[in-house]
Image (cartoon, rainbow, N blue to C red):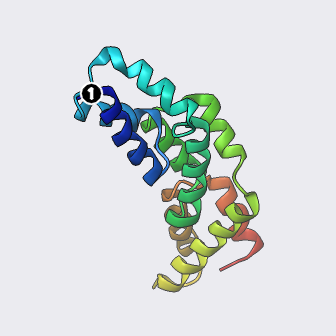
């Protein structure tokens, strides 16, 4: 595959949705682009603004919180799996809207509370907390929200 054809396909791939370097690296392998051309391709994609791991990390964190209702721990794990470096991960987490974060915890607690058949009490609270912690939220924050707004 010639370089211009590969770059054209990767531009479309990156323009469709935000991508990280690892995803582009995997796509390059599928396109059978020779290894010696990879550096040139990555440099071009970065210079043209198609590839930016810092931007990807922030977009990923925001969308996982808003759409999937994931907490910080699960978002961090997802970013590590995507091969992102620590500075990008920590900056993405810092950029999250903490009002939205707490509101998501409240929403998850309310939704789960409506579904539980368990009578009021400690066991019910444990099930609520376990559910929200399973979504990647920190236990101490979940308990804090639960105590401020008892279910």
Against 116, residue 9 (above or below) is: above
| Quadrant of the image occupied by residue 47 | top right
Against 151, residue 78 (above or below) is: above
Q: Residues within 10 Å of mark 1 (few under 14, many from 20)?
A: few
Residue carrying label 1: 2
Outermost residue toward the top? 36
Q: Nearer the viewer, residue 80 or 105?
A: 80
Residue 13 on image: x %, y %: 38, 46
Looking at the image, which residue is at 63% across and 66% down?
A: 105
Q: Nearer the viewer, residue 82 or 103?
A: 82
Residue 146 on image: x %, y %: 68, 69
Q: Count up the numbered dots.
A: 1
Question: Where does the C terminus fall, quadrant-wise?
Answer: bottom right
Looking at the image, which residue is at 71% across and 48% down?
A: 95
Against 47, residue 102 (above or below) is: below
Residue 123 on image: x %, y %: 53, 72
Q: Nearer the viewer, residue 112 or 124?
A: 112
Q: Nearer the viewer, residue 36 or 64?
A: 36
Question: Where does the N terminus fall, quadrant-wise?
Answer: top left
Against 29, residue 118 (above or below) is: below
Looking at the image, which residue is at 54% across and 75% down?
A: 124
Looking at the image, which residue is at 53% across and 48% down?
A: 75
Judged from the image, the secondary structure of the residue bearing numbered disc 1 is loop
Residue 84 on image: x %, y %: 51, 33
């Amino acid at each position: 595959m010639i370089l211009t054809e590969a770059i054209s396909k990767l531009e479309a791939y990156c323009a469709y949705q935000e991508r990280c370097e690892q995803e582009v690296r995997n796509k390059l392998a599928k396109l059978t682009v020779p290894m010696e051309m990879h550096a040139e391709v990555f440099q071009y994609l970065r210079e043209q603004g198609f590839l930016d791991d810092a931007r990807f990390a922030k977009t990923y964190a925001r969308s996982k919180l808003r759409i999937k209702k994931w907490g910080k721990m699960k978002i961090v794990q997802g970013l590590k799996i995507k091969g992102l470096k620590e500075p990008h991960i920590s900056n993405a987490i810092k950029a999250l809207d903490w009002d939205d974060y707490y509101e998501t915890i409240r929403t998850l607690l309310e939704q789960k509370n409506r579904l539980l058949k368990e009578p009021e009490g400690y066991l019910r609270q444990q099930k609520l907390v376990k559910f929200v912690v399973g979504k990647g939220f920190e236990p101490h924050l979940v308990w804090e929200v639960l105590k401020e707004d008892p279910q």
